[in-house]
Image (tube, rainbow, N blue to C red):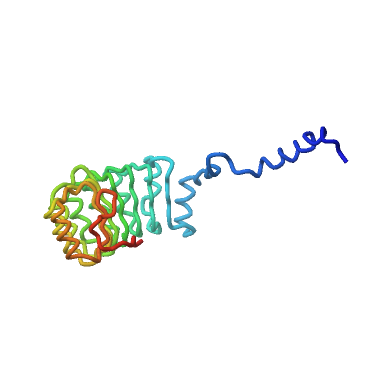
Amino acid sequence: MPSLTSLPALLIPLIVAGCGRQPPVGGSAQSPAQPPFAARVAAVREERLDAITVTDRPLDPGDWERLRGLTGLRELVLERGTADDSVADVLGSLTGLQRLVLRESPLGDEGFRALARCTALRDLNVPRADCTIAGVEAIAGLSSLRSLRLGGPNLRGPEVAKTLATFPALRSLHLIDVPIGDDGLAALGRLSGLRNLYLDGARVSDEAWAEYLTGHPEVHVHVDQAHHDRDPRGDHPP
């Protein structure tokens, strides 16, 4: 039997062996790098993939050219941008898109007119757009568009909401720093299929909200990133 004085020496190998199995301090290990962009585009062309997400960098001109005509792409998520009107033709050629997320992307009117060619689009997220109401009008005919998240410095006034009220299939709408005012909120009341409404910086009065919520109890409402305290619905639908 080993003496007490020899126990530390015996325990050292056990402690060292166990260190490799301990979780790193401060969280999980770093996620592996994303596969090369060109390889993912090739996989879509070969029908082995139908979605591309880029989180670590903006696309460069070569990347955009690789995307051109990629009709088998169903989902494109760009977390770092930067899509603007210079890539409008490429976006318009992605006619199979169902979900498009363009963060940090100042997409303008030309880009939105190109998106009107993506008739299968169901979910569109452009929180930093550079379009005007003309761009919003350009996508009003997207009959499958169910979810829209939109913001931009050129989108102001009730006319934006009046245009959005003509979108036939919207069920979820999020406007970011788009001051539509009381008249704009009243216009959104014409969206009979709407179930989720998120407005940040909308400049709507309490009286207008009270009227809206009374008339549309089926709509789940968030205002300035918070659940509206007059919303009779306590649940948070997906």
The quadrant of the rendering that contains the C terminus is: bottom left
Front-most of 57 and 12? 12
The quadrant of the rendering that contains the N terminus is: top right
Is 190 situated left or right of 118 in this image?
left
Front-most of 81 and 31? 31
Residue at the image point whose x is 45% and y is 55% from the top:
44
Q: Is residue 56 visible?
A: yes
Q: At which x and y percent is residue 142?
A: 25, 61
Q: Is residue 170 visible?
A: no
Would you place residue 78 above or below residue 196 in this image? Answer: above
Is 210 situated left or right of 86 in this image?
left
Q: At which x and y percent is residue 14?
A: 74, 41
Is 195 situated left or right of 30 in this image?
left
Residue at the image point whose x is 42% and y is 44% from the top:
55
Front-most of 96 and 6? 6
Residue at the image point whose x is 27% and y is 42% from the top:
106
- State the residue lying farthest toward the right: 1
Residue at the image point whose x is 25% and y is 56% from the top:
229
Q: At which x and y percent is residue 83?
A: 31, 44
- State the residue lying farthest toward the left: 183
Would you place residue 69 above or below residue 15 in this image? Answer: below
Q: At which x and y percent is residue 134?
A: 16, 51
